[in-house]
Every structure is written in C-alpha cells, then in structure tokens.
Image (cartoon, rainbow, N blue to C red):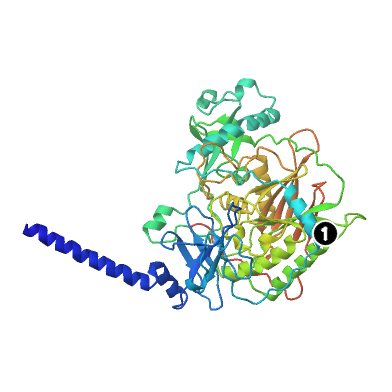
Amino acid sequence: KKTKAASGKKTKIHEAEATKAKKKSEESGGPSQQLLKRWFGGQNASITVHDPLPRQVPSSPTHVDLDMVDVAADRRKNGGQASVVSADTPVCVASPSVPASGMFTLAEDPADVPTQTPSQPRNPPEPPKVEELPALRTDTSASACAKLLAERVQHKKFEGIPCAGWQQYNDIYRLRLEKLRAPVRRQACSRWGNLQKESFMPKISGFLRYSGKQDIVLCGIISREMKTRPSVLHNYRHGKDLVDETIVNFSSEKDTIWLEDPSMRVELELHAELAARLATGLVVAVKGQPSSRGRFSVEDLCFAWVPEPTAALGSSQVYLALISGLAFDKKSPGLDSARRRLLDFLLHRCKEGCGNGTTCVRHVVLCGGLLSAAAEVKDSLARADIFLAELANNVSLDVMPGKSDLTNLSLPQMPLHKQLFSRARAAPGFSTVSNPVQLSFDGLLVLGHSGQPVEDFLRCCRLQRTKEAALECLSTCLSALHLAPTAPDSLETRPFHQSDPFVIDQVPHVLFSGGHSEAALQWHKSSGPGSGGTQCICVPAFHLQPAVILVNLSNPKDVKVVQDFADSSWVSPPDPVAVPAGG
C-alpha cells in the first residue's frame, strides 16, 4: 500500500510539471516560434505555404510545423527569403518581389494572419515592399516565338534515369561491353577484313594458343593502371584532402595498360603514341600476337563502328548558340561589359529576320558554368537571374548545370531547380536541363555535356592540355560511342545495373563539350561510305575566352565562332596552378 501511494504521488507530480511546461511553451509560442524569434531578432513570425494546385475548395495558406521540416531562413530587416525542405517537397525559395503562388512567404506575427472560417477563406499576408528591379527588355512576338520553340525542343534522355539503391560499379563495365561489343567487332571486321574468321576471338581467354602462329583480334575494355595516381585511402590515413583538384594529370610513363573482359585480363604492349591516347573505360578491338612473356603485342587498334546520322533537313539560316562559363561569381569590369555585349548580340540576332543571309539565333544552350566556384552564391544567382530572364523572354534557352553549379556532383547531373531563378522561371523560353543533355531540333540531334568527361579524360592520358588535345578526347569519345569512358573509375557517377546511360545509342549531328580554355572545331566523318558525320565542338568558358559558338540547325558543317565581346578593359582571370600527380 505504501509503494502504491508513493507511485501515485509521483505520477501527480509529473503531470503537474508537464502541464506547467506545456503552459510555458504555449505562452512563448512553442519551439517553432522560439526558433523564429532567434532568426528574426525576437519578433514573432510564422511561415505560410501557398498551395498552387487547383482544388475543389479555394486554396489558402497553411501553417507549417517547423518541428516536422527543416527550415533555413536568412535574417533580413525588410523581409527576406526562406526555404522549407522536406523529404516530400522540392526546395522552394520565396522572394517578396515575386508573386506568392507556389512559394513560401513570411508573416510578421501570427495574429496578423486572418483566421479562416468555413464560409470565407483567409487571404495570404501581403509581402513587404522592396525596391523594384529594372524592367526587362521583352518583345511580345519574340517571347511568343521563344515559348513555341521551347515546347518543340526534346531533352529527356538523361532526366528520367531512376536512382537505384547502393550497388557495386562492376555492372557498368559489363553493360558497356555487352552494348558496344557488336559495333566494335563490326569496325574490326571492316578494318581488318583480310583476316580469317577464326582470328576474331569471342573472348580473351585462350589467346595464348595462337602464340607465334597468326594475328588475332581481341575485344575488351581498356584499364589504365596509373602508378602515380593519388590513393584516397593513403590521403585519408595521413589527414590529407581526399581529392586534390590541383592535380592536372594522373598518368605517367610507368602506366600499365590492360585489356579486360568477363573471362580474363591481359597486359598490352603498345607504341607510346598509341598508349598516350587511351584511358580506362574505352571499349576497343586490338590486332596483334601473344608475346613470349604472356602479354599481347598490339599492332593496330580500333574503336566502334560509328553509323551516319540522319540527314539534316531545311535550308534556312537558323542558328543554335552555345555558351559556357559565364561565371557570374567573378567580378571584373571587362567581364561584366563582355556579358552585356553578349546579351545585346543575342537579343539583336533573335529579333532579326532569317532572310537576306542574316544570322538568326533561335535557341541558346548554356553549357554549364553559371558559377565558377561555390562562393557568393546568393548575389551571383541574382545577377544570373536577371541575365537569363531577359534572354529567355526573347529566345528559347536551355541552362545546363556544371561542375560548380548548385546540383548533384555525380553524372548525370540533374537540372538546376527553377526556384533558384525567381525571374527567369516566369520567362516563356526558360528551361533547365540535365548534364549531359540530348536535344532534338526538328530532326537534328544535338548531344553534349559541360566538360567534366573531357577534363577527366585529359587527366588520365598522356596528351598535353591544349585545345587540340581536348578536341581529340571529344572525338575519341565519339569514335568509342561513349560520352564519359572514365566514369566511374575517376569521374563521379552513380552505380547503374540496367544500362549504361552514357553509351551513345543514337549518333548526333552535333557533339559539344563546355568549359574549355579555347574554342575548337572538328568534323568527324562516320564509318560508312557516305559523306555524313558529326560536328565536334569544344565550347570555350566565357570568362576565359569571350566567345559564342553558332551552329546552323540545317547544316551542322556551318559553324561560326563569334568573339567580338571583349574591350580594352578585358583581363582574363588566371587559372589555378595545377601540378602533376606526385609533383
């Protein structure tokens, strides 16, 4: 009885303490209100959500429980921006200067928000007044044309790839070899047609039976063993950075090159010039003989059979503009004026007629590089937003992410969230796309990326870092029918177990790579007897070389490099000093 009485007394004490704590929490506004008070200088505030979806009842603001979602808010005196992130809700950024539909807004005090009755829905609080931004230059006819062209462009290949669970990466190489073995063998048969049928071995194992007898052909994936490549485990053990971005090259003269397939791997003996062009992940066929040391002595090498693209139709002078590396986080008088000259040039060209031999720009692709580094993101995005909004109001515009832009790091990179661009997202021609991206303009296929695959290819081979070497790497990727051969060995990507998304299953008319130091062009002829081929383009980073590439959508061979944007104040920012691996 004494124990029971003591237990009942303790229960009453706990209930009294809980009631007292609850009352105190309600008086102070609860934990959510306490957080907001700390963020907004002690003033009461609340967050409301405006539901943009049509419903049978009028949409109304809904209070968000801050204990159930993560909230990040910037502290500002005259109203600010707030973002609410949850597992089921995409990131939404609200600005007082933008209409509140589909966004989150701030109210100064919960008491200022009118209560909702069944007969009369409450209205959202008016956002605080802010300074008006300059008006955009908008042409009504150009805006309608930009919207129409944006709807006709197709770019869905890399955006619909599902996110798989954690798996091993070896499936990627198996899928790549299964997909590309047939076109590689076809090219080998076309190149070395004088060999007998049994000389084309179905797998690597058993090649030693032909030692000293005749030339044979092996097919597999290249694996470059780079002796001077930094070890992540070694760096972690000694407290160093896991990834050193200043290292310009992982390869050296001590590298060993292997050829692999599911049956086995064999070391290749190659000429130095041929070995310098190879990197891990390329599917190739090699012709030669087994050596006395159990290796394979290579006499010749080939990539895949590249079919001819479908013929481009039309004869109008309509052009696609390719731009890269605007780097709005870099501030210099010369770069700012060059961007203004670029905008004036594009707006003038998109409003011109397409007759009398004039260059008419109807679509613009920004090939990554809105930001060059993750610094001063807020101000840089505001400047980029004004630039993109004015451009997308007059021409169809696709914005790709780059290495330093605000999206995922691993390829394929998902499109930049439209809520990052409060003004541009309302423009009729504005669209954010993935990296890599595949675009279709009335039958003309354009494929490209923001430059990471070519940059990593150069790190893993023995070519010099010149514009000719970058163009050769891009051309090699087309010859091998693979956009990013060094992924996942040294280039970030996700594990895939159903297919390799970087295999080029449809040969494009235009293949581009962004973020380079200089512009470079090359016509890559197809493997067939016809005259068709693909235009390979290295798009320069605008902050390194202020230029824009114009491609005729009716004739991919017609390419123009316009670089009249720099004035006397132009100073190219120096690149970071890079050192070789182990240097």
Q: In which quarter of the image is residue 280?
A: top right
Identity of the residue drawn at 93% across and 55% down: 356
Q: Is residue 290 visible?
A: yes
Q: Is residue 286 visible?
A: no
Find residue 370 and report its horizontal and vertical position in percent: 64, 62
Identity of the residue drawn at 70% across and 72% down: 336
Q: Name the residue under label 1.
A: 141
Name the kind of residue labelled 1 in the image: Ser
Q: Is residue 518 above or below residue 555?
A: below
Could you tell me which secondary element the residue under label 1 belongs to?
helix
| Number of numbered labels in the structure image | 1
Find residue 262 and report its horizontal and vertical position in percent: 49, 31
Residue found at the far left of this picture: 2
- The foreground one among 90 and 561 is 90
Identity of the residue drawn at 77% across and 37% down: 310
Q: In this view, does 199 lie above or below 554?
A: above
Find residue 66 and report its horizontal and vertical position in percent: 44, 63
Find residue 19 and report its horizontal and vertical position in percent: 28, 67
Residue found at the far right of this picture: 356
- The foreground one among 191 and 548 is 548
Q: In which quarter of the image is the N terminus?
A: bottom left
Q: In this view, does 134 lie above or below 231?
A: below
Q: In which quarter of the image is residue 178?
A: top right
Q: Local crowd at mark 1 within 10 Å, few (<14), some, or many (≥20)?
A: few
